[in-house]
Image: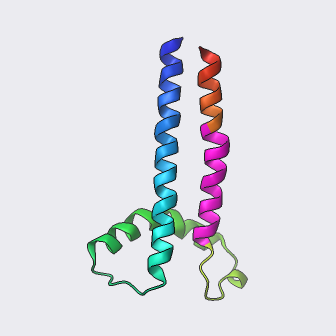
């Protein structure tokens, strides 16, 4: 049973790292958007390619009354990521510890 426990523990750690990195990428993208970056810059293109598939569906779900010049999708996405880290990752950690 310890093998499954170690696997779940490792899975939870990797998922936590990915969600943490994604949070920082979204924050960096939001900060960069304030200064009107060069769209041909490799870093800007990387940030857009990584974060746009996550932000676009949330942007589509927002009603048009929320689209008043401020993009709220990064804030909503970060709140969803915080929830996933608090619930999903912590549940995996707890389940892995109880399996030992």
Q: Quadrant of the C terminus?
A: top right
Residue located at (49% from left, 76% from top): 31
In the displayed structure image, the side of residue 56 where residue 64 appears, left or right:
right
- Residue sitting at x 48%, y 57%: 22
Q: Residue 43's x, y, as percent?
A: 31, 70
x, y percentage for residue 32?
Answer: 44, 78
Residue 87 falls inside the magenta stretch: yes
* Numbered-mark total: 0
Q: Residue at x 52, y 27 (%)?
A: 8
Q: Is 3 left, or right, of 49 in this rendering?
A: right
The residue furthest right is 65
Dominant secondary structure (helix, strand or loop) of the stretch shown in magenta:
helix
Q: 11 and 53: which one is in front?
A: 11
> Of residues 27 and 67, which is closer to you in this image?
27
Relative vertical location of residue 37 with respect to residue 77 in this rendering, above or below: below
Residue 84 x, y percent position in the rendering: 62, 47
Q: Magenta residues?
A: 73-89
Q: Is residue 84 magenta?
A: yes
């Amino acid at each position: 049973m310890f093998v499954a426990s170690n696997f779940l523990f490792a899975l939870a750690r990797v998922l936590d790292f990915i969600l943490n990195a994604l949070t920082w990428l979204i924050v960096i993208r939001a900060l960069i958007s304030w200064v009107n970056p060069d769209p041909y810059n490799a870093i800007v293109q990387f940030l857009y390619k990584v974060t746009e598939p996550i932000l676009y569906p949330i942007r589509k779900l927002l009603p048009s009354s929320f689209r008043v010049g401020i993009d709220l999708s990064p804030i909503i996405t970060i709140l969803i990521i915080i929830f996933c880290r608090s619930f999903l990752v912590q549940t995996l950690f707890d389940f892995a510890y109880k399996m030992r």
